[in-house]
Image (cartoon, grey):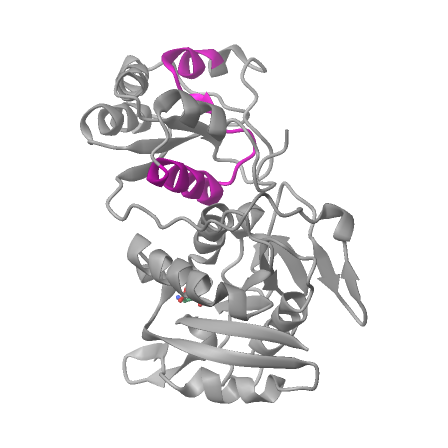
Amino acid sequence: MSRILVLYTGGTIGMDHTPEGLAPVPGLLPRLLQRFERPGMQFDVVEFEQLIDSSAITPRQWNQIIDALSASYARYDGFVVIHGTDTLAYTASVLAFALRGLAKPVVLTGAQLPLVHPRSDGWANLADAFEAACQADLTEVVIAFDRLLLRGCRARKLDAERFDGFNSPNAAPLAEFAISAHWHRQRWLRPDGEWRPLRLEENLKLAALMLTPGHGSTLAGQALRDGGLDGAILLSYGSGNAPADPALLDGVAAMRARGCPVLTLTQVVKGAVAVGAYAASQPLARAGAQPGGDLTPEAALAKLHVLLSAGLAPEALREALGRSWRGEMTV
Ligand code: ASP
């Protein structure tokens, strides 16, 4: 018998039409979930007091999810987190890093169309999420969506229109659901040490700054120098290239001098930062920006948030950022 806890946080999946447009309706989704009752699996549903459109998520709600998982961790074999798709990849990444020592499945899912819609994709997503949550040897945070099981800290929302809304551009799926479920167990992570979930610092100032031709690099440099940031990611071009704009390089150096991390990522969906592939990648690295490999922006922000919440000193932080702990980076 698998005991599963379902946390319902909001999102399209449990919405219905209201005079204002689609909005979450308390009580609706727990009622609809009764359809998944079956022998061999028993589940409880916790509906969050404030069901949100996930575009409104903040670190406070992430802590609510972390607290709910921590409080019930010993009593359940697996967890399903129902969430809006807009920020699903951010929440999955945060949980992947914050739930240190996780040894049970945590499966996030949602839908592009509400369950009350006759063509909703939510039913299949929920069915696959429950199936994954019953796999005792799945010991990581994953997303079940459109017949794929993806590593949470590798996944991105890539389509707001089609049912295949999520993928993990730099990592193969962990399972594929067809007539049979194909579990790619050789790709699954092993538990990492003892269970020690970490709550997030809620007031950190983190920014994702995208370089754009023209003034973009100067504006990014000003935000780094004067923005009072605790950490930042820079979305550079291609394999980590950027103009040698003095304002940008000064901003990176100022962050470095304050002991605040700056990670260089690529704004390209697939691929990695490779310092030295082009000469144009060197100035940023020399100024002190740390290459983030093929981290997604969502995973990079989550990793910064969790490591800064853990209070690591700058050198330990740099070392931890350069390592892949939950399969988030290709090394
Ligand atoms: N705006 C919705 C949300 O993220 C979109 C969805 O769930 O698909 O809550």
* Figure check: 154 above or below 325: below
Residue 69 in picture, x, y percent from top left: 45, 63
Using the image as rendered, state which of residue 154 and residue 18 is in the foreground. Answer: 154
Regarding residue 66, the answer to whether it shows in the image is: yes
Q: Main secondary structure of the magenta part?
A: helix
Give the position of the N terminus as an image quadrant: bottom right
Using the image as rendered, state which of residue 99 and residue 210 is in the foreground. Answer: 99
Give the position of the C terminus as an image quadrant: top right
| Left or right: 146 as drawn, with respect to 27 | right
Asked if the stretch drawn in magenta spans residue 197, the answer is no
Q: Quadrant of residue 211?
A: top left
| Left or right: 248 as drawn, with respect to 299 | left
Using the image as rendered, state which of residue 128 and residue 186 is in the foreground. Answer: 186
Regarding residue 109, the answer to whether it shows in the image is: no
The part of the chain drawn in magenta is 282-310
Q: Quadrant of residue 50?
A: bottom left
Residue 52 in picture, x, y percent from top left: 33, 69
Q: Residue at x 56, y 37 (%)?
A: 325
Residue 286 in picture, x, y percent from top left: 42, 10
Asked if the stretch drawn in magenta spans residue 304, the answer is yes
